[in-house]
Image (cartoon, grey):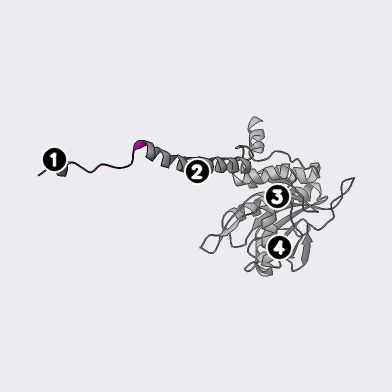
Amino acid sequence: MSDSASQPPTSSTSPSTASTRLTPTLAVCAAVLAVAAAAIGHLTRGFELWTYEDLRRDQVRRGELHAVTTTLVTADGASLRAFDAPAPAGSPSRAEVYVVDFIYTQCASICQTLGAEFYRMQEALRREGRGHVRLLSVSIDPARDTVPALKGYASLHRADGERWTIGAPTRKAALDDLTGALGVIAIPDGLGGYVHNGAIHVIDSAGVVLGIYDYDDWEHALRQARGRWPSPFPLPQAGEGERARESR
């Protein structure tokens, strides 16, 4: 057997050639990473806002979040057209300010907690006078939340129609338009329910969102709706209310 037959095959590609081939690939990867970093930086406002709720609340502070005009059928079978007033020019309008949550009547968790919090707000309005504030619970399940279902939820939480309206959009498309405009998430969970936002929104009659609050921070939501409206800069946002209470 010859010496040449026992020699292992050698690669015809030199290290310099392999390096040359890798250079364009590395350049493309670097470019993709740079674009991704720039996009993330833009979406997170310079890497400062990392949750979807943070982004929504930042939109509120910038005056960028607006509800669209929506017609609802209410628990008493009436029709309510919300967020349809013209934006006030000059002096503040005396039109209603809505304190809004999104629920569905078959929800056994957060919606019941929201119902309890809205009842507390209702009783505060009963004691102190409603003024221009109206509580509004909007169903994200209009197909099942018929008038009897809405009435059952209203009865369960002792809703007073003079202060607290519970309703469902008259069309699924109208619900999609409203939740899309506000960035409200409502995703079917595969078990007949929804994964959805549990926040409380303060919205003026023209649809301008003035504040977004955690569901357990209803006192600040009501305070803004009653006393500081129509300022586009809400009182304490996410976590600030808790810090204020802890400091007392």
Q: Which residue is mark 1?
A: 3
Decide which of tag 2 and tag 3 comes sooner along the chain: 2
Q: Which residue is mark 2?
A: 28
Residue 151 appears at what percent x and percent y? Answer: 68, 65
State which tag comes first along the sequence, 1 or 3. 1
Inspect the image, locate mark 3, and give the three-letter code of the amino acid beneath it.
His
Work out which residue is located at the far right of the displayed protein and give it.
90
Residue located 70% across and 38% down the image: 236
- Residue segment shown in magenta: 9-15
- Circle 1 — which element? helix
In this rendering, the label closer to the viewer, 1 or 3: 1
Pick the front one: 190 or 159 = 190
Q: CA distance from mark 3 to mark 4?
A: 16 Å
Amino acid type at circle 1 is: Asp
| Residue 218 appears in the figure | no
Neighbourhood count class around disc 1 (C-alpha, 10 Å): few under 14, some 14–19, many 20 upward: few
- Residue bearing the label numbered 4: 167
Residue plotted at (71% across, 62% down): 167
